[in-house]
Image (cartoon, helix red, strand yellow):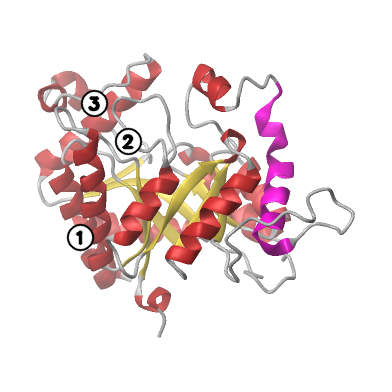
Amino acid sequence: MSDVDESLPLAVLDFVGIEHGESPAAAIAGAVSIAQTVEAAGYRRYWVSEHHNMHSLACSAPELLTAHVGAFTSRIRVGAAGIMLPNHTSFKVAELFRTLVAMYPGRIDLALGRAPGTDPLTAHVLRRGGGADAGAEFPHQVGELLAFLGDGFPSDHPYARLVAAPVVDERPELFVLGSSPYGPRFAAVNGLSAVFAHHMSPELAFDALRAYRREFTARGDGDGDGPYSAMSVLAFASEDEEATLDFEAAWTLTIQNISRGVREPLRPEDVHGFARSERFRAARRDDGRMVTGEPKAVAARLLEMKQQAQADEIVVVTPSLDRARRQASFTALAEAWRRAA
C-alpha cells in the first residue's frame, strides 16, 4: 500500500507566520515542527504559500522552505501552494522543482498561481518592472513550464534544445490554484488538478469545483488522466472555546490589518482583548468562511464540504498566533476525521 493510500485526504497550507517577538529563524523551525506534527497525524501534504513584503510571514521563498521541510520529514508530500508563476520564469521554476524531485522523489508538489501574492509595488519589483498584465501571460507560462518539465517543445521551437536540469523521469504533482472561477476552469481545460481557495472566496468554491469536475478534459498523456481537486478551508478544532475565540479573532484582525496595509505580527494581548470584547462577540456569526469548534463537529463539517464540492482533498488553513494550539488542532482534527469518515 502506498503512502497516499495510507494517508488521510487532508493537507495543510502554512503561511509560516512569525509570531510576535520571535525571529524568522524560530518561525521556520516552527514550520518544520508543524510539518512533522501533521506527518505523524497522517496528513497527505504540507504546503507553504508564497507571500512577499510582510514582516509577519517567512514564506517569500517557498521553494527553499520545501527543501528544508523535506529534509526533516520522511513520508508526507511537501511543496508550494503556490508558486506565483508571473513572479518567476518557467525555466527557473522547472529547474528548482526538478532539483526538489531529485532530492525527494515521490514527495514534491507544485501548485501554480497567477496572482502576485503581494501588493502592486512589490509585484512590479519582482517582475523586473514589466508593465504588461502578467496574469495574462499565465497560460503561456504554464505551457512553457509543462514543456520544460517533460512535455517537450516542437522541434522547430527556439527552446527545443534547452534542458531544465537536473533531468529526472518524474515531475512534481501539479495543481492550479484559484480563488475565482478562472483557476479551476483553466485546470479543467488543460487536464490539470485544481485547488480552490475557499478561505478567500467561500461563496464561489462549491460551484467552481463542481464545474471543474464536469468540464475536465484529460490530457491523454497518462499522467493524471482524471480530475483531481482540493479545497482550502479556514479551520480550527479544539475543545477549548477560548482557544477557538482567539483563532477567530486573530483571523479577523489579520484581515483588518491587511486592508489597512499593516503587515506586522499580531500582539497576543491585542488578540485576547479583541476576542473577549463585546464588539467582537456581537459581530461573531457563522458566515461559512471558517469551520471552528469541537474536533468532532469540525471534521463532520469538513467532510460535508468535501462532498458538496466533489473535492478529493481538504486543505486545512489554520493561521494563528499560537503554534502549539495549531499543532493540537491539526492532531485533533485528524483523529476526529478518522472516526467520522
Q: Quadrant of residue 134?
A: top right
Q: Which residue is mark 2?
A: 58
Disc 3 and disc 2: Cα gap in Å?
11 Å
Instruction: Provide residue 156's location: percent of width, then percent of height.
Output: 90, 54
Disc 3 and disc 1: Cα gap in Å?
25 Å
* Dominant secondary structure, magenta: helix
Q: Tag 1 or tag 3, which sits nearer the N-term?
A: 3
In what element is the residue under mark 3?
A: loop
Residues 164 and 47: in front is 164
Q: Nearer the viewer, mark 3 or mark 2?
A: 2
The residue segment tinted magenta is 132-151
Q: Residues within 10 Å of mark 1 (few under 14, many from 20)?
A: many
Q: Which residue is mark 1?
A: 331
Left or right: 78 with respect to 332? right
In what element is the residue under mark 2?
A: loop
Q: Residues within 10 Å of mark 3 (few under 14, many from 20)?
A: some
Left or right: 269 with respect to 284? left
At 40% from the left edge and 47% from the top edge, which residue is drawn? 64
Q: Which residue is mark 3?
A: 265
Name the image quarter holding the C terminus: bottom left
Disc 1 and disc 2: Cα gap in Å?
23 Å
Q: Quadrant of residue 60?
A: top left
Kind of residue indicated by mark 3 = Pro
Name the image quarter holding the N terminus: bottom left
Instruction: Provide residue 24's location: percent of width, then percent of height.
Output: 24, 35
How many marks are shown on the rendered structure?
Answer: 3
